[in-house]
Image (cartoon, coloured by chain):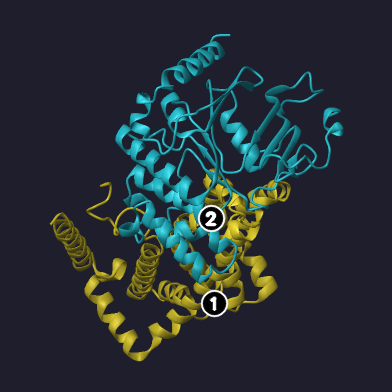
């Protein structure tokens, strides 16, 4: 019942905020901040004429591609460094420098190297995601219970088997922690890339709207991006719950603890 | 480093497990400057023997098991299994290489992401696909430790005693001839412990294992062991070796009723006291 109460509260708060937005829009004029009704109307039109899908799929593809290109190596490198302490400390030094560089400042370089097409955006997203996933996976690898590793060694586990059966399952929660932080960054990276130079994508749509004094179009782009991030995060947490059934929670059994 | 050169490549195959001048130290420098946890330890364990190891805390009981399990690298001496040298100061420690040794540690070390069944099968799956007869054996083992209704549960859903049973079944699952146990029942309540001790004796009798069992409980040591060794001192050495002649089958809960119990108890206790107040 607490859950239901929570949702009622959330819904009420959302309604109040939307009403306030609408009110300000009507009083001060929709020119400055548009209004929820205008935004919904415009989303509907853009959905019908296919513009939203046209721009949205570029942003999605760039974000998704960059996400994979960043997350997979980030995870793999962090796992691979486990048994190589020397390489690890060397790599961590370099990674700290890479992490310190503001990724958006790299966009001019990426455009120079990869052109104004999707390549530059994918590269931007991938560099941002790599570090997020790398560091969170690294935390997980460091937190693996040494006693589990040692007991598996006594059972005759090879290095590869340790990685697969002990390190990887132990690291999954950390990887997901990183991935969930990374999702908004992936979309943000794609959007920023598009704003800087592009003729398509949701970032371009927002940029175009602003330059055309079309506030509603800017908000349409923002709302779409928000919906994408929310739904991807929700999907990710579903997958996470399935993978982490072994943790306390959903699989609780009433007989637990009884001998 | 000079002492090990005198050791032969093989040792006469008298006992199943032979420790010769085994030592482990930390720190740097010559052997005199280093800090020795165990030194010049000689111990023979016969096939099928139940050996209990006692000692004041810090005497190196767990270290000794870690050396035998090869999760620690000895600084001196040799370990021989069936007369063949398998570990020592001049060989890199390679735990699990022989798959002759099972180790039940103080913590149950079950993998939280595997069900009880998958945990028990884990050592077998590491070695490849388990045969039908292996699976049947494990099924019987799980039955014997009373976990059959719990095979699909995750470790966090079990009580401490049940996790300990699962851990024991997992170690016996791949059928190692030698089983090391480091205060496995230390953290359990008295009733559960007595039940597990009785089950362990049954398993030991039916599975014909050689067991090295570390405990700080004199009753437990006498109830389970064929022989008790007491480690003491710094560096740790064997200061007492005592054969327990109480007839089997024994009832661990009523072991104090055995006529020779008091004699064993006093001898061990005075030895432990002498060790803890040098």
Q: Residue B2 occupies which quadrant of the picture?
A: top right
Describe the element under mark 1 as helix, strand or loop: loop
Q: Position of residue B149 (x, y in %)?
A: 30, 59
What is the distance, in whole Å, between disc 1 and disc 2 at their CAs?
45 Å
Q: Looking at the image, is mark 1 or mark 2 earlier in the sequence?
A: 2
Q: Position of residue A258 (x, y in %)?
A: 25, 47
Between A18 and B100, the residue placed more toward the observer is B100
Q: Residue at x 73, y 47 (%)?
A: A86
Describe the element under mark 2 as helix, strand or loop: helix
Q: Position of residue A117 (x, y in %)?
A: 60, 79
Q: Position of residue B91 (x, y in %)?
A: 78, 43
Q: Residue at x 45, y 60 (%)?
A: B138
- Residue A166 marker: 2
In yellow, which chain? A
Chain for numbered disc 2: A
Above or below for A247 versus A202: above
- Chain B's shade in the image? cyan
**Residue A76 falls left or right of residue B10:** left
Q: Residue B64 occupies which quadrant of the picture?
A: top right
Above or below for B39 versus A137: above
- Residue A90 marker: none
Chain for numbered disc 1: A
Above or below for B182 versus B173: above
- Residue A198 marker: 1
Mark 2 nearby-residue class (10 Å; few <14, some 14–19, many ≥20): many
């Amino acid at each position: 019942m607490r859950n239901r109460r929570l949702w009622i509260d959330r819904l009420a708060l959302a309604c109040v905020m939307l009403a306030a937005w609408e009110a300000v829009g009507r009083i001060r004029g929709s020119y400055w901040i548009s209004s929820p009704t205008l935004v919904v109307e415009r989303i509907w039109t853009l959905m019908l004429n296919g513009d939203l899908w046209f721009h949205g799929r570029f942003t999605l593809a760039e974000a998704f591609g960059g996400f994979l290109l960043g997350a997979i190596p980030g995870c793999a490198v962090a796992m691979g460094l486990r048994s190589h302490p020397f390489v690890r400390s060397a790599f961590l030094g370099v990674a700290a420098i890479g992490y310190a560089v503001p990724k958006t400042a790299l966009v001019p370089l990426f455009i120079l190297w990869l052109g104004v097409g999707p390549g530059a955006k994918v590269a931007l997203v991938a560099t941002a995601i790599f570090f997020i996933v790398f560091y969170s996976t690294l935390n997980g690898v460091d937190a693996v219970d040494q006693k589990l590793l040692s007991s598996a060694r006594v059972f005759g586990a090879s290095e590869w088997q340790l990685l697969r059966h002990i390190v990887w399952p132990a690291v999954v929660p950390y990887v997901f922690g990183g991935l969930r932080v990374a999702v908004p960054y992936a979309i943000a990276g794609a959007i920023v890339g598009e704003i800087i130079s592009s003729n398509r994508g949701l970032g371009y749509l927002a940029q175009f709207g602003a330059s055309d004094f079309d506030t509603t179009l800017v908000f349409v782009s923002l709302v779409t991006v928000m919906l994408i991030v929310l739904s991807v995060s929700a999907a990710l947490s579903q997958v996470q719950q399935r993978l982490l059934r072994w943790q306390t929670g959903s699989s609780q059994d009433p007989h637990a603890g009884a001998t | 480093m000079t002492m090990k050169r005198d050791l032969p490549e093989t040792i006469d195959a008298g006992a199943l497990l032979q420790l010769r001048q085994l030592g482990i130290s930390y720190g740097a420098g010559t052997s005199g400057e280093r800090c020795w946890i165990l030194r010049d330890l000689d111990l023979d364990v016969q096939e099928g023997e139940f050996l209990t190891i006692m000692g004041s805390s810090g005497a190196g009981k767990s270290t000794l098991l870690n050396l035998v399990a090869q999760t620690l690298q000895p600084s001196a001496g040799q370990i021989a299994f069936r007369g063949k040298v398998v570990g020592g100061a001049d060989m890199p420690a390679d735990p699990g290489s022989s798959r002759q040794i099972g180790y039940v540690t103080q913590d149950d070390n079950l993998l939280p992401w595997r069900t009880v069944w998958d945990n028990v099968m884990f050592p077998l799956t590491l070695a490849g696909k388990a045969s039908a007869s292996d699976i049947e054996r494990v099924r019987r083992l799980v039955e014997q430790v009373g976990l059959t209704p719990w095979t699909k549960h995750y470790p966090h859903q079990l009580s401490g005693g049940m996790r300990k049973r699962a851990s024991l079944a997992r170690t016996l699952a791949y059928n190692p001839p030698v089983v090391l146990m480091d205060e496995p029942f230390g953290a359990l309540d008295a009733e559960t412990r007595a039940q597990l001790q009785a089950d362990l004796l049954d398993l030991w009798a039916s599975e014909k294992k050689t067991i090295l069992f570390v405990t700080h409980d004199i009753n437990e040591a006498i109830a389970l062991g064929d022989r008790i060794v007491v480690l003491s001192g710094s560096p740790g050495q064997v200061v007492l070796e005592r054969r327990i002649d109480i007839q089997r089958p024994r009832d661990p809960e009523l072991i104090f009723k055995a006529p020779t119990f008091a004699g064993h108890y006093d001898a061990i206790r005075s030895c432990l006291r002498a060790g803890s107040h040098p």
